[in-house]
DNA sequence: AAACAGTGCAACCGCTCTGAC
DNA sequence: TGTCAGAGCGGTTGCACTGTT
């Protein structure tokens, strides 16, 4: 004998709830409170199974449910949390007041997931779908300059960076997000150490990236190639923008999760190390699509905060018009994420 | 205007997990 | 320790709505 079903299916109503049924359920719960779902339908005069009542209440009738379209902030929070928590919709919903796990799941499957796929991002791993990348094209492209790889080689000779990359990559595969959080916390300690080293080397104007709680991958200055050093100012500008405008993560993700460097919309910090090395050559900022190229490496902010117009310096108003943005606008804005471009103006001879 | 296809969302189903007893 | 109710999840369905032909 297996477990008895939660309710007797015979004679119980299914399908959409009527206003009368909703009213009965609401009135009953107001009087007696939620719970005891198995006996609730009978005592409330509903011809529904307990599970149906529970779902109806938790997903629709609860007074704190927020209806309507998801805002940009909510969407970005979902993506961020999903990158850390995976398909733990209830955990995600717990950080999105007024939204239910079912609603978030539906929204993920019908909107976000499709968009990520169209962008070539694996919605499960939040990483670029390498199977979609035509590597031969990339390798044959005249845009791919070996000098950028030399910069990468220099970076990879740094054991600290390699250790960080390995740690983060391995952590990103951990099922337990707490472990990931712990690893990233360790990362922050290293950042702090490197920050101390860097503070004495870089002028203040080029040292902002360490103040940004979101950008936490340190670049070991001692071993940087000129290519990388050239990137620092651009990078710090964006970091400063994030600081001035406050990152969404500071606002929305509580306590422990704030330790997480966001996966940069599908990129682990280790990915970002490589992206940084190639400077403008790789992952050219999404700011391009709004003519904000001068901001250089605006990767994090442009994806996470998704400014609609104007300069990312105006990031404090990033979300103001978010709800009025169309799906296409969101996608077109993010679709440049995967662009690999090397500006023609970039003279690689300087880096050799 | 009608038919059709595509899309979004509420709701359901079956299963697993968790905590209380 | 086993049982059970509740919670959570992935997958799916059905229907209303919208856009296209």
Image (cartoon, coloured by chain):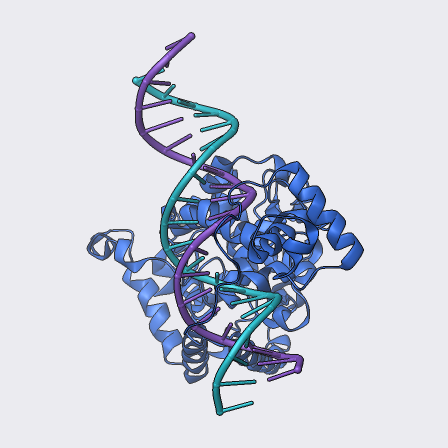
Chain colours: A blue, B purple, C cyan
Q: Position of residue A32 (x, y in %)?
A: 77, 58
Frontmost residue, A87 versus A257: A87
Seen at 69% across and 51% down, the residue is A44
Please identify the quadrant where the N terminus of chain A is shown: bottom left
Q: Position of residue A335 (x, y in %)?
A: 42, 45
Please identify the quadrant where the C terminus of chain A is shown: bottom left
Left or right relative to A154: residue A104: right
Frontmost residue, A198 versus B17: B17
Frontmost residue, A112 versus A40: A40
Q: Quadrant of residue A206?
A: bottom right
Residue A165 visible in the shown view: yes
Seen at 67% across and 38% down, the residue is A20
Seen at 52% across and 71% down, the residue is A217
Left or right relative to A223: residue A96: right
Q: Quadrant of residue A93?
A: bottom right
Asked if residue B8 is positioned above or below residue A64 in the image, the reply reads above
Q: Position of residue A245 (x, y in %)?
A: 69, 53
Frontmost residue, A36 versus A172: A36
Left or right relative to A118: residue A39: right
Left or right relative to A332: residue A100: right
Residue A291 visible in the shown view: no
Q: How many marks?
A: 0
Q: Position of residue C10 (x, y in %)?
A: 41, 60
Asked if residue A273 is positioned above or below residue A61 in the image, the reply reads below
- Kindly give the residue lying farthest to the front in the view shown: A11
């Amino acid at each position: 004998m297996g477990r008895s079903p939660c309710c007797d299916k015979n004679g119980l109503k299914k399908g959409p709830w009527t206003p009368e049924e909703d009213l009965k359920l609401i009135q009953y719960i107001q009087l007696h409170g939620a719970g005891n779902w198995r006996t609730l339908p009978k005592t409330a005069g509903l011809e529904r199974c307990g599970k149906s009542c529970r779902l109806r209440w938790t997903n629709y009738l609860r007074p704190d449910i927020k209806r309507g379209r998801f805002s940009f902030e909510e969407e970005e929070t979902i993506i961020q949390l999903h990158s850390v928590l995976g398909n733990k919709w209830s955990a995600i919903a717990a950080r999105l007041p007024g939204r239910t796990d079912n609603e978030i799941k539906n929204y993920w499957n019908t909107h976000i997931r499709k968009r990520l796929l169209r962008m070539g991002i694996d919605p499960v791993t939040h990483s670029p779908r390498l199977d979609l990348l035509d590597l031969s094209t990339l390798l044959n492209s005249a845009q791919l300059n070996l000098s950028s790889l030399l910069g990468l080689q220099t970076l990879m000779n740094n054991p600290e960076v390699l250790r960080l990359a390995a740690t983060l990559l391995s952590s990103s595969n951990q099922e337990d997000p707490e472990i990931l959080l712990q690893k990233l916390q360790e990362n922050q300690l290293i950042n702090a150490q490197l920050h101390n080293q860097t503070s004495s080397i870089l002028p203040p104007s080029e040292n902002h990236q360490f103040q940004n709680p979101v950008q936490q991958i340190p670049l070991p200055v001692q071993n940087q190639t000129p290519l990388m050093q050239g990137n620092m100012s651009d990078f710090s500008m964006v970091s400063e923008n994030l600081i001035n405008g406050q990152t969404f993560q500071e606002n929305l993700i509580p306590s422990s999760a704030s330790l997480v460097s966001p996966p940069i919309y599908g990129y682990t910090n280790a990915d970002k190390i490589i992206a940084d090395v190639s400077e403008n050559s790789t992952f050219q900022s999404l700011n391009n699509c709004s003519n904000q190229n001068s901001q250089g490496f605006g990767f994090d902010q442009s994806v996470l905060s998704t400014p609609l117009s104007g300069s990312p310096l105006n990031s404090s108003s990033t979300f103001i018009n978010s709800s009025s943005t169309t799906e296409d606008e969101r996608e077109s804005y993010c679709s440049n994420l995967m662009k690999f471009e090397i500006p023609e103006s970039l003279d690689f001879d300087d880096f050799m």
